[in-house]
């Protein structure tokens, strides 16, 4: 499951004064600084999770202290931490936030200084989009030609850092840009803003900014409304609202709430196809269901179709029926089910068959529906499910249901693996021209399915997987090969065995492994200080990208790599887990590369660095690489 406790934290520990007693002798040690009153609240209400970030998938205390006031306050009062913070009084919440990040909201005054001059303020949208959405195209190939990217394979082995942009008090860079011509439409979720950034010259600048009261969540998709030919952007926020903007001006055209339940969440990028927007819906009840005080569980995933012109809902395809009472938990209260099957990924469109494909996650309560840990083919017109393929049955999983002591909501019997389909499905072709559906699972398995029936064509197993391991955020396809990155943070539950962190190239026709690159720890120089888990947390979790003949991958240890698609040889390697001088004058550093972080266009390779979840390395920087000039 891919629950992202995004929005749970902010920045800067409050500086405390140290008091010295004048009565002490000159050589006596100074008295200890008095503890901030918020520390006791943190220790009581927060430490159990945030001091164990790998096990609980929450931001660490250090990451919380690097976030912004607005984000933590939103999380505690309106966002994902409402339930956990409900026992705190308003005064206690304010004291807790002050302990973590200080009493002042983060300043974004840099934006005004970074605006483009008047003659560069309007995006030129005459070109076809280079990056349309999460998958770069409607079939989620995540593949760009040399002409689209402005980069050839030879260029990818000869890159240099062109510029960096830092974003103050951000820690988790999780969303890639849509790219049209010389404009990046780039969201920074923790800043609650989407920026139109002009990259037409060596010095980038901001053309317009869209700001919302709640943090943003997904990457954007770019497209055109069929009647008016208006160029638009569509994306979702942390409150499960889907937004449509005019791409030229940043004006909001409509906003629609798509959440089905209190714990609904939008994570996968919405997709604009013809006159409809298709929005995948996930959930975060998994994170609270293990609490005995929670009535578990009712939330399930879905895809909702919206009218692209108005945002009105047309249909909703539910991943299962509504939950109902199943059994007494043992304390007189009822367990509810079925629940689960969230959709974390972005839909792939199969226009020939009139369907979209999505992958689902695990169940969160009994019974596990047959649509959990599954691939669904959903009719574009009416939302009916044409077929489904379940990869792992009876996978019921809740955070907190580990070890010998289990809560009342924990499943009696379950494989308890949390091996959902987090990676977006790809619609590809075999060498004989036949279509094929490709899907990567956190079990460590790459699947190939018949698009008409959902039957398995082939499968390739790379290990045992885990809740954060296996194939995590995405796969890529170049017409002959599908590339499957493997995330395996060492030392975590279920991660002993044959699975190795790295990336595999697999022949689309047969499932044959053509080459494998295994990532190795690098703690050379001062990396042990910059990347505290440099010897263990080296998995490849981020969705990769194919550019001409190069495969671009990002590691949790901060390494950006470009591989030759035919051999796996490393053509380029760069350590992003470091401090950077930025074009906008904001202090910035990189960290883990995760989620949706890699894109290209206008002769640049763009990479996010920093992901402060799951015990990974936070950061706040967007990096742009270009070929070194010839001498």
Image (spheres, rainbow, N blue to C red):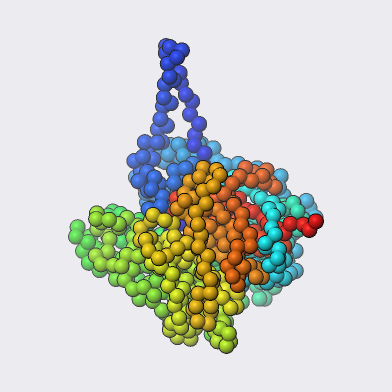
Residue 518, how many percent across, how many down? 50, 63
Q: Is residue 275 above or below residue 493?
A: below
227 relative to 191 in the view: left or right: right
Location of residue 176 by image quarter? bottom right
User: In the picture shown, does residue 506 fall above or below 563?
Assistant: below
**Most foreground residue, 522 or 129:** 522
Q: Residue at x 56, y 75 (%)?
A: 481
Residue 173 x, y percent position in the rendering? 56, 54
**Which residue is depicted at the point 46% across and 54% down?**
537
Q: Where the C terminus falls, by quadrant?
A: bottom right
Q: Is residue 146 left or right of residue 220?
A: right
Residue, x 41% and y 79% (percent of image)?
389
Q: Is residue 111 above or below residue 268?
A: above
Q: 443 or 57, which is in the foreground?
A: 443
In the picture, residue 125 is in which quadrant?
bottom right
- Image quadrant in which the N terminus is located: bottom left
Residue 305 appears anywhere in the view? no
- The correct choice, above or below, for 432 with respect to 148 in the image is below
- The total number of labels drawn is 0
Is residue 326 among the parts visible in the rendering? yes
């Amino acid at each position: 499951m891919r629950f992202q406790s995004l929005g749970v934290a902010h920045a800067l520990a409050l500086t405390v004064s140290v008091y010295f007693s004048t009565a002490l002798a000159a050589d006596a040690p100074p008295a200890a600084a008095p503890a901030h009153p918020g520390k006791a609240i943190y220790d009581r209400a927060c430490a159990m999770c945030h001091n164990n970030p790998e096990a609980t998938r929450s931001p660490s205390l250090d990451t919380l202290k690097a976030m912004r006031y607005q984000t933590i306050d939103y999380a505690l009062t309106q966002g994902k931490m409402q339930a956990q913070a409900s026992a705190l009084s308003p005064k206690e919440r304010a004291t807790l936030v002050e302990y973590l990040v200080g009493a002042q909201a983060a300043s974004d005054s840099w934006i005004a200084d970074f605006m483009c001059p008047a003659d560069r303020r309007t995006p030129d949208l005459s070109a076809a989009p280079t990056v349309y959405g999460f998958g770069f195209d409607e079939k989620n190939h995540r593949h760009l030609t040399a002409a689209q990217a402005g980069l050839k394979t030879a260029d990818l082995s000869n890159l240099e850092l062109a510029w960096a942009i830092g974003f103050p008090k951000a820690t988790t860079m999780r969303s890639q840009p849509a790219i049209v011509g010389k404009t990046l439409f780039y969201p920074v979720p923790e800043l609650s803003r989407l920026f139109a950034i002009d990259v037409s010259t060596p010095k980038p600048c901001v053309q317009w900014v869209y700001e919302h009261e709640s943090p943003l969540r997904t990457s954007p998709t770019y497209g055109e409304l069929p009647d008016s030919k208006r160029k638009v952007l569509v994306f979702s926020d942390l409150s499960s609202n889907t937004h449509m903007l005019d791409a030229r001006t940043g004006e909001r055209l409509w906003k629609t709430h798509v959440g089905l339940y209190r714990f609904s969440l939008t994570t996968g990028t919405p997709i604009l196809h013809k006159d409809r927007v298709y929005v995948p819906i996930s959930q975060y009840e998994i994170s609270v269901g293990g609490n005995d005080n929670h009535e578990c569980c009712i939330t399930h995933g879905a895809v909702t179709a919206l009218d692209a012109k108005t945002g009105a809902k047309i249909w909703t395809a539910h991943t299962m029926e509504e939950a109902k009472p199943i059994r007494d938990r043992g304390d007189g209260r009822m367990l509810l089910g079925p629940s689960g099957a969230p959709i974390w990924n972005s839909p792939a469109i199969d226009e020939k068959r009139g369907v979209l494909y999505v992958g689902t996650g695990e169940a969160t309560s009994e019974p596990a529906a047959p649509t959990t840990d599954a691939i669904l083919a959903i009719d574009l017109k009416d939302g009916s499910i044409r077929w489904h393929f379940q990869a792992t049955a009876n996978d019921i999983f809740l955070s907190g249901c580990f070890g010998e002591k289990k809560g009342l909501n924990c499943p009696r019997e379950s494989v308890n693996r949390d091996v959902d389909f987090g990676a977006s499905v790809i619609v590809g072709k075999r060498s004989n021209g036949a279509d094929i559906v490709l899907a990567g699972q956190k079990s460590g398995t790459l699947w190939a399915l018949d698009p008409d029936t959902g039957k398995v064509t082939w499968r390739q197993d790379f290990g045992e997987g885990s809740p954060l391991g296996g194939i995590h955020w995405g796969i890529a396809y170049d017409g002959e090969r599908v590339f499957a990155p493997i995330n395996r943070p060492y030392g975590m539950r279920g991660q002993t065995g044959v699975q190795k962190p790295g990336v595999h190239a697999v022949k689309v026709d047969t499932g044959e492994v053509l080459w494998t690159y295994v990532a190795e720890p690098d703690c050379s120089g001062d990396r042990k200080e910059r990347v505290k888990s440099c010897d263990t947390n080296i998995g490849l979790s981020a969705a990769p990208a194919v550019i001409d003949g190069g495969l671009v991958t990002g590691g949790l240890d901060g390494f950006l790599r470009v591989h030759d698609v035919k051999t796996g040889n490393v053509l380029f390697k760069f350590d992003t887990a470091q401090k950077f001088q930025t074009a906008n004058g904001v202090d910035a550093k990189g960290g883990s590369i995760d989620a949706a972080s890699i894109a290209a266009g206008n002769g640049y390779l763009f990479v996010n660095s920093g992901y402060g979840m799951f015990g990974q390395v936070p950061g706040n920087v967007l990096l742009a690489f270009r070929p070194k000039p010839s001498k």
